[in-house]
Structure formats: C-alpha cells, structure tokens
C-alpha cells in the first residue's frame, strides 16, 4: 500500500467506529494467513467486554471458529476502512436456528482513510489477468493488472488494443482473475490511456463505479493480500511468510495471461518481427488520441526497421503483412500499403532515402481516422455530410506530421495528402485532377485502393481481388491504367498472401512465387496442414480460384 494505516487505541474512538461497523452488511470476517472475507452480522456490542457475531449465512466457517483460528473483522465506518487486531471466538447457544459466536472487544483498530488510496502494486511473479468489456457488441479486451486500490486500478494492455479505449469511456465489466481462480468483478470508467516511456506497453487507468460495501471490503481484502504477497517475495529467506492463496494457481488456470499470448501465435517468424512495427503504430495512435503528434524519432527508427525487413526478404515480409490478424484495421492497412508501395518503388530502383520516406508516410497515412468519432468511422452507411467529416482525416494527420522535418514535403503531399485523389477529380480532399497528380501519387493510389477494396468495412464486404482488378482497369478516368497494370504484373494474378484452391482440392496460402508468377511455396491448410516447396507444389495441381480468406490464424505456425 502507499501509506500505512493509523492505529486507534482511544476507547471512545473505538466505540464510535465499532458502532458504525455494526450496521447490517457493514462487516466481514477473514482468517489470518489465508481466506477470502465472509460477510457476517455484528449483532451485539458490549463495550470494552465482547462482541457477538452471527454467522448463520456462512455456516462453513463455524468449524474454524470453534477451533479458535484467529480472524480479523473488517468494515466501513465514517468514510474509512477499519480492521480489528486478530481475534478468536467461542460458540454461543440459546438462539434456536442461529449460529452465533462471541469474541473479545477490540483494544485497537487499524484505520485507512479513503484519501490514503490503499494502492497495492503487483510485482514480478504475480500475474493477474484482466478482462475489459465495453459493451455486448465488442470483443473482450484482455490485459494484466498492474496495481489495485479501493478507487480503481491500473491495467496493462497490448498496444494493439489500447486505441479502442478512450478517456471517460464506460466499462460494462472489469474483471480481474487471480491465479487461484478468485475474481474481482466491477463496473467503471476509463480515466486515462497512455504509453510507457519505451513505447512498449499501454497503461489504462480505470476508476470503479461506487462499489457496494461488500464489494469494497472484497477489494480491500485483495489489496492487503497483494501487498502481503509482494512483501513475501521481497523478503524471501528472511521471514517464514506463507504464500497468499490468491497466487496459488488453480489446476484449470492458465499460467500465462491471454494478453501475453497474442503475438506468439502469428504464423511466421517474419510476422512476429513485423508485429514490433505494428506496436509502434498502435502506440502512435494512442499518442495521437491524447493530443500528441507523430513522433519523428520513432517514425524514423521503425521506417528503417521495416525497410530493412523488405531488403532482407521481400516475399516473407509481403506474406507477413496478411498474418497480423490481431492488429486494428488502420494498422493492418498502413503496413500493407507501406510494404507493397515500397516494394513496387524498389523494383523501379527508387533511391533508399526515397524508399524510407515512402515507408514512413504510407505507414501513418490513414492514422488521422483514429481521431474521428467512433460512430462515424464505424457507420454502415454515409451521407454527403458524413463523407465530408470522414475526409477530414487527411488534414488531421498532415498537421501531426509537421515535426517530422526529415520527411520530404513532396512525399508527404503525394502519399498522405493525395493518395485519396482520383484522376477525374472525384477524390478528396482537394478534388485534384490528372495533370496535378505526380507519378508517386498515381502509384500510391493504386496500391492503397487494391488493399482497401479487398478488406471488409462497416459499409460493405470485401471485394475479391479479381473484381478489384477488373474495377480499376475498367475506370482509366479514375486510376492510372499503366500503374494498375504494373501492379498486376509485379504482384501477380495470384499474389503472395492469397488463399487459393487447387485442382487437387487442396487449399493453401501462397507464400512465394517463381519468376513466372507461379507458386513455389504454399502453406497448405486442407486437407492437412503442411508446407509444400518448389517441385512439391506441382502435385497440388493448377489454381482454380482465390478463396475468401478466413483469419490467417488458421495457418500452421512456422
């Protein structure tokens, strides 16, 4: 805890506090060493002599009381949390149908005033999984508890989930699951979302709604047990302090919180490396939502990293870009466009300095949408006024890029400012036409549209790749036909990352192509998961169609 309790030994003050604790539902009993608090009734107070407890609602503790096992009484009084020193009890008779015990009147009380916060920090080896539920329509977000107090808690989330939370957002359910299987379930509100100094994790401060007295006592018990376990670990070998039952794993409890496992199941080693760059974009989105700008140093660092992966193994990187199914759509799209656009430009011998700028601007070109209202971004249909609002994302992100002075203004203009323009002037935000659009803009818009159209959106399902190619080739007034053809020739009719069906009936993901654009490495998922290379691919037959891809998590892990 942050602060120690104050000790009350004055008889008059003890009497006032005990009287307040005697209200119905105002006191809990917990045994020393272990045991969750149990609600009991304080039915009689004989000042300076004894207390009478009614445990009829919790008969399971009668045996331990009869064995004179030490316990403490805990309750609320005058806005504070109050606890007795260890007590023992003796059974009472004379009240038919009731289980009652007598214990000594407390000679001192420990009092924690609410202003003291009672915050307990969880240290190494004390994993507590957390589930955050915003509403019934959204997925449960998995995290890990960092600290706990009567007023709320701090939760660590994977960076790819942090952008979904915003300050003052209501939490329909916040549940902490301890290794023992015991749980704390509450409702609350998000107070802040921030990124740690190393940009490696998101920290979410949550405030509980006003808890019931019973829930508050349970939180208080958990806080004490967390602190006790932290002290035990810090003084191991010095004190004979037994472990808290809260941190003794139940047989059915996972050893590792779900939040730590998200990235481990990405299909390929390259995908797991690419996830680190995705984390930068996730963190950057949170920073933008908190009023920050694009971080120039971080953007430069991760652009170099992505370009290095492209130079190391372009095919593995292109395939990795379809594997990041845990990432938000804006991050998936930004990485896919950055990788394919830089790959296409590199094939045309663009200098490395330009390639880095292309990677950087493409990664963040759509992040302005994270600054728009969720209802607008997730709308299943758009009228003219809503489209105008949606188009604001371009100006929003361009403003936040001003600190990145190492980026060439022309590249920012072409990829961030003009990627949504069309040759016939039907695009946005400027309605620019053919003659005013650079070659880089023309190339970027093709890469952007191919990726965007083949992804599902709230207002429409994903298009097939064939339909996308057909749509773009059939509209030369909108899209530069030469760049559409360059794209198709370079990435192929069945590009890396396609899930296809072969004439043999096998289904698999294309991971590498030969010089003729034919598969030379396929991750087969049906009828049995296996990797086919070079001559083995021929045994699968010819490709019959590109399938609507399920989540890439169905891929065998490599």
Image: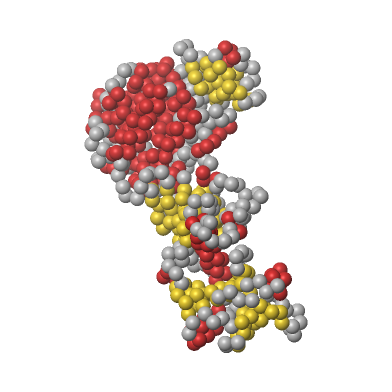
What residue sits 64% from the left and 17% below the top?
504
Residue 176 rendering spot, x and y as whole percentages? 54, 56
Q: Residue at x 42, y 46 (%)?
A: 201
Image quarter of the C terminus:
top right
Can residue 130 be seen at all in this image of the molecule? no
Out of 265 and 456, give the one closest to the viewer.
265
Left or right: 103 as drawn, with respect to 273: right
Which picture quadrant has residue 198? top left
Quarter of the image holding residue 446?
top left
Q: Position of residue 83 (x, y in %)?
A: 53, 74
- Rendered location of residue 357, percent (x, y): 29, 30
Q: Report the residue that reaches farthest toward the right.
A: 96
Q: How many marks?
A: 0
Work out whether residue 542 or residue 216 is closer to the camera in this orientation and state it.
216
- Residue pictured at 32% horizontal, 37% vertical: 299
Query: Can see residue 94?
Result: yes
Query: How is colour applied across the structure in the image?
Result: secondary structure
- Nearest to the observer: residue 126 or residue 386: 126
Quarter location, residue 59: bottom right
Q: Is residue 160 left or right of residue 528?
A: left
Q: What is the x, y in percent for residue 169?
A: 44, 56
Give the residue drawn at x 38%, y 17%.
486
Residue positioned most to the front: 238
């Amino acid at each position: 805890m942050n602060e120690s309790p104050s000790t009350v030994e004055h008889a008059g003050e003890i009497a006032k506090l005990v009287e307040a604790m005697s209200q119905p539902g105002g006191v809990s009993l917990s045994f020393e060493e272990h045991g969750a608090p149990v609600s009991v009734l304080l039915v009689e107070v004989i000042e300076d002599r004894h207390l009478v407890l009614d445990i009829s609602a919790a008969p399971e503790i009668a045996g331990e009381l009869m064995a004179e096992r030490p316990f403490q009484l805990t309750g609320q009084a005058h806005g504070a949390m109050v606890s007795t020193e260890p007590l023992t009890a003796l059974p009472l008779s004379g009240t038919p149908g009731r289980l009652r015990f007598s214990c000594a009147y407390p000679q001192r009380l420990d009092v924690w005033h609410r202003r003291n916060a009672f915050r307990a920090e969880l240290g190494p080896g004390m994993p507590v999984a957390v589930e955050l539920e915003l509403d019934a329509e959204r997925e449960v977000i998995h995290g890990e508890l960092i600290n706990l107090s009567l007023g709320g808690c701090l939760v660590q989330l994977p960076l790819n989930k942090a952008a979904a939370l915003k300050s003052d957002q209501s939490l329909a359910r916040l549940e902490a699951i301890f290794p023992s299987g015991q749980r704390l379930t509450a409702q609350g509100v998000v107070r802040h979302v921030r990124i740690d100094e190393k940009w490696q994790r998101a920290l979410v401060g949550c405030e509980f709604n006003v808890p019931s007295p019973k829930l508050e006592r349970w939180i208080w018990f958990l806080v004490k047990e967390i602190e006790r376990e932290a002290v035990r670990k810090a003084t191991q070998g010095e004190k004979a302090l037994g472990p808290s039952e809260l941190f003794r794993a139940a047989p059915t409890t996972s050893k590792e919180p779900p939040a730590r496992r998200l990235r481990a199941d990405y299909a390929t080693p390259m995908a797991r490396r690419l996830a680190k760059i995705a984390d930068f974009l996730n963190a950057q989105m949170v920073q933008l939502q908190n009023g920050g700008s694009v971080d120039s140093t971080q953007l430069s660092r991760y652009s170099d990293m992505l370009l290095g992966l492209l130079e190391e193994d372009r095919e593995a990187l292109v395939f990795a870009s379809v594997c990041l199914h845990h990432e938000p759509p804006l991050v998936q799209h930004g990485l896919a466009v950055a990788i394919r656009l830089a790959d296409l430009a590199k094939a045309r011998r663009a200098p490395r300095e330009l390639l880095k700028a292309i990677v950087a601007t493409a990664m963040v070109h759509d992040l302005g949408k994270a600054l728009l209202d969720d209802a607008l971004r997730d709308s299943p249909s758009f009228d003219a006024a809503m489209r105008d609002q949606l188009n604001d994302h371009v100006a929003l992100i361009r403003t936040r890029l001003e600190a990145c002075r190492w980026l060439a203004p022309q590249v920012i203009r072409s990829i961030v400012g003009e990627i949504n323009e069309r040759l016939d002037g039907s695009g946005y935000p400027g309605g620019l036409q053919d003659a005013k659009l650079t070659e880089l803009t023309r190339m970027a818009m093709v890469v952007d549209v191919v990726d965007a159209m083949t992804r599902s959106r709230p207002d429409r399902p994903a298009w097939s790749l064939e339909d996308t190619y057909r749509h773009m080739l059939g509209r030369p007034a909108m899209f530069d036909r030469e760049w559409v053809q360059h794209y198709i020739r370079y990435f192929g009719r069945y590009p890396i990352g396609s899930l296809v069906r072969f004439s043999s009936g096998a289904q698999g993901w294309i991971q590498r192509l030969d010089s003729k654009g034919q598969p030379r490495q396929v991750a087969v998922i049906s009828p049995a998961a296996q990797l086919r290379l070079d001559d083995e691919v021929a045994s699968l037959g010819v490709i019959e169609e590109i399938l609507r891809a399920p989540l890439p998590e169905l891929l065998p892990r490599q």
